[in-house]
Amino acid sequence: MAEKIIRVLLVDDHQVVRRGLRTFLEIQDDIEVVGEASDGAEGVARTEELRPDVVLMDIKMPGTDGIEALRRLRELANPAKVLIVTSFTEQRTVVPALRAGAFGYVYKDVDPDALAGAIRSVHAGHVLLQPEVAGALLTQDEGGGTGRGSTLTEREREVLGLIADGRSNREIARALVLSEKTVKTHVSNILMKLDLSDRTQAALWAVRHGAAG
């Protein structure tokens, strides 16, 4: 069976950056660049139009920035996974993007092979974080402490552990011999009980509190 092609959209206000990213990715057999956008608003529109698997998104752009674009994509329930490509290393810049729904980030001087690997990893549902940024993100989410985890049922803990492993609802259903509908219910209950907004935060919570497999 042929390997699935990962469809990628590039969103950056600098044409030279988009050109460089495209050059990196065009040599990959399993990655196809399906389009480009020069700011966040155009990025949202193109993501809705082209339905890419992964979006490489800059943070700092004129007009609608990457963080606002992430929020709009979440409101639209767009399934594309967003990987931030940034030249900014400050936690105060990266953390808000992760909280807005990004699956991780890489730096603009990333090695081509590492960039391709990051795209494959995010496409598979994994969260890519530097340890110091994961720590900062989790510190901000610590309001309820570990006590929130005590409200989870044993089954919900199993589901949470698989979320942290980057499993999709379908894969979790298969692993636990459950229906996808039941898994979705468990995921919703987990997010509600832990007061988290998405699977990315759930995965981080699991890692921080030892619930990951």
Image (cartoon, rainbow, N blue to C red):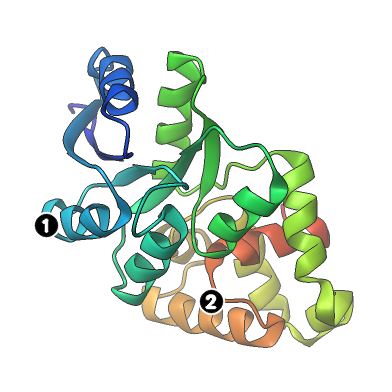
Q: Nearer the viewer, residue 134 or 63?
A: 63
Residue at 32%, 55% (x, y): give it. Answer: 40
Q: Is residue 152 left or right of residue 24?
A: right
Q: CA distance from mark 1 to mark 2?
A: 28 Å
Tell me which label, 1 or 2, sits earlier in the chain. Answer: 1
Is residue 163 visible in the rendered structure shown here? no
Q: Is residue 86 left or right of residue 170?
A: right
Residue at 67%, 83% (x, y): give it. Answer: 195
Secondary-structure class at tag 1: helix
Toward which corner of the image does residue 203 lie, by quadrant?
Answer: bottom right
Residue linked to disc 1: 49
Which residue extends farthest front? 62
x, y percentage for residue 51? 18, 54
Q: Residues within 10 Å of mark 2 (few under 14, many from 20)?
A: many
x, y percentage for residue 150? 83, 82
Residue linked to disc 2: 187
**Tag nearer the camera, 1 or 2:** 1
- Does 175 appear above or below 188? above
Residue at 77%, 67% (x, y): give it. Answer: 140
Q: How many marks?
A: 2
Is residue 15 visible in the rendered structure shown here? yes
Q: Are marks 1 and 2 in contact (CB under 8 Å)?
A: no
Q: Residues within 10 Å of mark 1 (few under 14, many from 20)?
A: few
Q: Amino acid at mark 2?
A: Val
Q: Is residue 213 left or right of residue 188?
A: right
- Does 142 appear above or below 59? below
Secondary-structure class at tag 2: helix
